[in-house]
Structure formats: C-alpha cells, structure tokens
Image: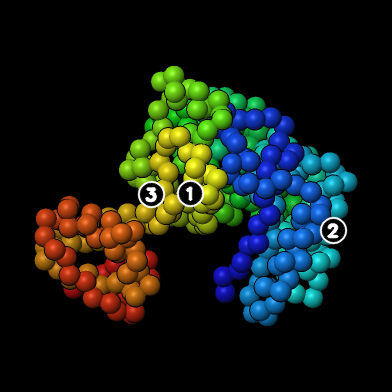
C-alpha cells in the first residue's frame, strides 16, 4: 500500500546562504518553531489513525541538518513521541550536501530517520557554481555514500533549466544518478521567482528560463532514462501554493506540471505504437485514461496532431498499467 508523507516546511531554517533562485518563504509560506511543529502534529493525529495506511513525517525546505543540534533533537523527539502507537514508519528530512556532518548522521540513526533527501540540484560543477551552491559534485556523491553507509535511504532533488546548463550537464546528471541509484528522486524545473538574484539576471537579459514545452521534454528524458535504472521518481514539479503562484516571474510554471510530463510520455508511447499499425486501436488500462487524455486533453490532442487522424482507444484492465497496447 502506498504510504503517506506528512510534510512540515522549514522555510529557510538552517540554510547557510541564499542561492540565486531561492525564496523559500514564497515556496513554503511557513517558518519554523517547535510550537508550530507541535500544533501541526496535534492536527495530524486525528487524520492518520487508519490502521492499514503507513505514513512518514518529513521536514522539507531549509536544511534540517544545519539546525542547532539541540533544536533538531527536540523536533525529532517530538515527532517520534507524538506518533507512538500509530502506523508511523519514520522520519525523513531534506538538507544540503555541505550541511550533513557525521555527527548529525549519527543523530539520524539514533532517531531512526529512514530517508535523507539531498538538494543536489545538479552534478555538473559549472552549474553548481552558477547557482552559488558552494559545493562540488564530488561533495554531493560523497555525502550520498555516507548516508547509504548508515543504511538510510537516499533521495536526490534535481533542478532542470539552470544557468550554464548544456547537453553535457544532462549526460553528467544521468550518468551519475544511474551510478549511485538513490532511493528516490524529485525533479523540479527552475522558475524565476520575485525577489531573487535570478530575477535580476532575467530582467537584465542574462538568463532565459526553459519554456514549458522544453521543460516537459527534458523531464520526460530523465524519467525514461532513470526509471530504466530502477530509480523511483516520486515528484515532478513544485508543490503549488497561492503565494508561489503569485510570485512566478517567468519560467515553465504549471500547476499540473507532473501530470503534463507523465501524459507526454504516455502519448509518445502511443504514437510509436500507432505508427507501426496505422488506424489501430489503442488498448489502455482504466487507470491510464487520464494519462492518455492528459490535462485538458492535451495528451490526446498531441497524438492526433502527430498522426493526423482521430485515434480510437478501448479500456481493458488486462493491459498492464503505465503502457498502452494496440489491436
């Protein structure tokens, strides 16, 4: 059964500095305090007592491992104690590769943290420099290895569309990720947000973000290559909040970005099948109808546009989910 992740967003808590694209206050709209965490936990308790639904609690945003150890210990204890006698699976948190000490890893082991996600953003040193991340690709890989050595699952958060990004960047990212095989991956398209240094670069004409179509095609490339390597992609696109939506200056913003990417991939699979048998009928699992049609029928229109004729489809739940068939 799919497990639920209950998130608490840290804002910029623990971050050693501001990257050129970042405005966590806009992304999360939440600041950190133990009382806020306590209130959130109390509110969740009544909603997670379904006995057959495992769940995790996650500290996202900011850099959890860069918090003062006393505060981090207090928060970890609070979560562990509050969720006793529930179907609580464990804690996960996000942080930066340059903010995770061996001492904090031992603290994570003590509190049975099950997943640590690193906001790596890129494995291309040139891109990391342009983003002002202040660590190298080798630093990130070393950090992931140290996490794995403690038998904690690793996660990677990756940005696409960064300044200085080239085809070589994607080759480096794909090769590195396929080699280290993190337990999970999140893919985010870079957006230009108000009040960031990146906004200034954009307004001066020094940076041009990806178009929505470019970002979708690039995300699909990563999905295809990395899922073949056994890497779980658990999120594509930023979580929508009213504040974030109002603060996007430019870039491939869409509330359903992940759905657009998954539908695009499904549509491409369908097109390849139908080119082998012109006029054939697609066979899809009922669960895949939203992928075939796509957001506002974008996926279906893409298939018709590419093939030049209306496409028929049938629902058959014997068809494997995630892949169309043909008759």
Gap in angstroms between the C-alphas marked 3 and 2: 40 Å
Residue bearing the label numbered 2: 77
Looking at the rendered image, the quarter that the C terminus falls into is bottom left
The numbered mark at residue 237 is: 1
Q: Which residue is mark 3?
A: 220
Q: Give how far apart the Cα atoms at labels 1 and 3 are.
A: 12 Å
User: In the depicted view, which residue is nearer to us: 136 or 18?
Assistant: 18
Crowding near the residue tagged with mark 1, few <14, some 14–19, many ≥20 C-alpha atoms within 10 Å: many
Q: Picture quarter containing residue 136?
A: top right
Position of residue 245 measured from the top left corner of the image (x, y, whole percent): 49, 45
Q: Who comes first in sequence, dot 3 or dot 2?
A: 2
The structure residue drawn at horizontal position 58% and vertical position 44%, both measured from the top left corner, is: 27
Image quadrant where residue 123 sits:
top right
Q: Position of residue 114 (x, y in %)?
A: 71, 58
Residue at image position (41%, 48%) is 254
Residue at disc 2, secondary structure: helix
Sooner in the amino-acid sequence: mark 1 or mark 2: 2
Number of marks drawn: 3
Query: Residue 80, which numbered label?
Result: none
- Mark-to-mark CA distance, 1 and 2: 31 Å
Placement of 238 over or under 272, stated as above or below: above
Task: Locate residue 262 relative to residue 302 in the image: left or right.
Answer: right
Question: How far from the left and from the top, in percent, is residue 221?
Answer: 38, 46
- Left or right relative to 65: residue 223: left
């Amino acid at each position: 059964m799919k497990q639920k992740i209950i998130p608490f967003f840290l804002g910029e808590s623990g971050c050693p500095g501001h990257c050129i694209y970042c405005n966590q206050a806009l992304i999360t709209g939440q600041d950190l305090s133990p009382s806020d965490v306590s209130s959130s936990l109390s509110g969740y308790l009544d909603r997670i007592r379904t006995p057959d639904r495992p769940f995790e609690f996650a500290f996202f945003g900011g850099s959890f491992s860069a918090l003062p150890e006393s505060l981090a210990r207090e928060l970890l204890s609070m979560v562990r104690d509050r969720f006793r006698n529930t179907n609580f699976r464990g804690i996960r948190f996000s942080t930066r590769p340059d903010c995770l000490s061996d001492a904090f890893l031992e603290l994570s082991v003590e509190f049975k943290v099950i997943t640590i996600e690193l906001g790596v953003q890129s494995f291309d040193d040139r891109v990391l420099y342009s983003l002002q991340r202040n660590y190298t690709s080798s630093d990130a890989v070393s950090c992931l290895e140290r996490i794995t050595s403690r038998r904690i699952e690793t996660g990677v958060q990756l940005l696409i569309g960064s300044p200085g990004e080239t085809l070589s960047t994607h080759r480096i990212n794909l090769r590195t990720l396929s080699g280290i095989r993190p337990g999970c991956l999140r893919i985010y398209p870079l957006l230009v947000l108000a009040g960031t240094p990146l906004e200034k670069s954009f307004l001066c004409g020094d940076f041009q973000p990806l178009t929505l179509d470019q970002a979708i095609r690039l995300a699909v490339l990563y999905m295809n290559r990395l899922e073949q390597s056994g890497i779980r992609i658990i999120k594509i696109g930023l979580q929508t909040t009213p504040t974030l939506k109002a603060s996007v200056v430019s870039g491939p913003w869409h509330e359903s970005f992940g759905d657009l990417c998954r539908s695009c991939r499904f549509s491409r699979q369908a097109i390849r099948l139908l080119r082998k048998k012109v006029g054939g009928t697609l066979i899809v699992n009922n669960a895949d109808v939203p992928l075939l049609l796509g957001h506002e029928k974008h996926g279906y229109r893409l298939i018709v546009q590419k093939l030049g004729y209306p496409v028929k489809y049938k629902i058959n739940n014997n068809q494997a989910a995630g892949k169309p068939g043909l008759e």
